[in-house]
Image (cartoon, grey):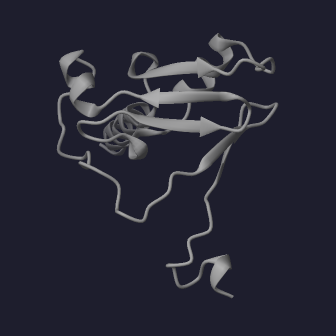
Amino acid sequence: MKIRLLIILFLFIAKIALCQQTRANSFICHLGPNFKDLTRSEIVSIICNSQFENFRLLNQRVTLNFDNGFDIILLSAQELQQLGLINDLSSYQQAFPPKYKLPVFHVNGKGQIAAAYPVNTDVKYSRGNR
C-alpha cells in the first residue's frame, strides 16, 4: 500500500513539474543585432526548462527582455488554448497590477536565469525608500 501511495505521489509531482515548464511553441524568440553568446536552439532549450507561466497574460502577449541581447515574447493564454497547448485559462490574469514593472532577465554561461527587478519607490521595503 505504501509503495502505491509513493508511486502516485511521484507521478503527481512529476505532472506538476512538467506543467510548470514553458513550452517551445508558447513563445517567440527575437535575437538582437549584436547577439552572439548563445544559439537560438540553446535559448529555446533554456527557456523551455524554465518557468515563465506567471508572466503570461490571458489575452495579451508579454515581452520579456534579457540583457544578453534577446527578447522572448510570450503568447497569450488564449492563443495557447487555440493552439491546443492548454485547456484551463482560469489561472491567467488579464493584466499586471498598475504599478508592476517586469524584471530584466539574464542568462549566465551555465544556462541559469536571473531576474533584476526595478526599484519601486511605492513599495515599503524597496531600496529606493531608504
Q: Residue 122, relative to residue 43: is it above or below?
A: below
* 65 horizontally vs 5: left or right: right
In the foreground, 49 or 116: 116
* 77 horizontally vs 63: left or right: left
Percent across and percent down for residue 103 are 58, 51
* 11 horizontally vs 87: left or right: right
Residue at the image position 24 percent from the left and 40 percent from the top: 58
Which image quarter: residue 2?
top left
Q: Residue 89, relative to residue 120: is it above or below?
A: above
Q: Quadrant of the N terminus?
A: top left
Q: Quadrant of the C terminus?
A: bottom right
Percent across and percent down for residue 46 are 62, 26
Residue at the image position 71 percent from the left and 38 percent from the top: 67
Residue at the image position 25 percent from the left and 23 percent from the top: 79
Which image quarter: residue 80?
top left
| Number of marks drawn | 0
* 125 horizontally vs 10: left or right: right
Which image quarter: residue 32?
top right
Q: Residue 103, relative to residue 59: is it above or below?
A: below
Q: Residue furthest front?
A: 33
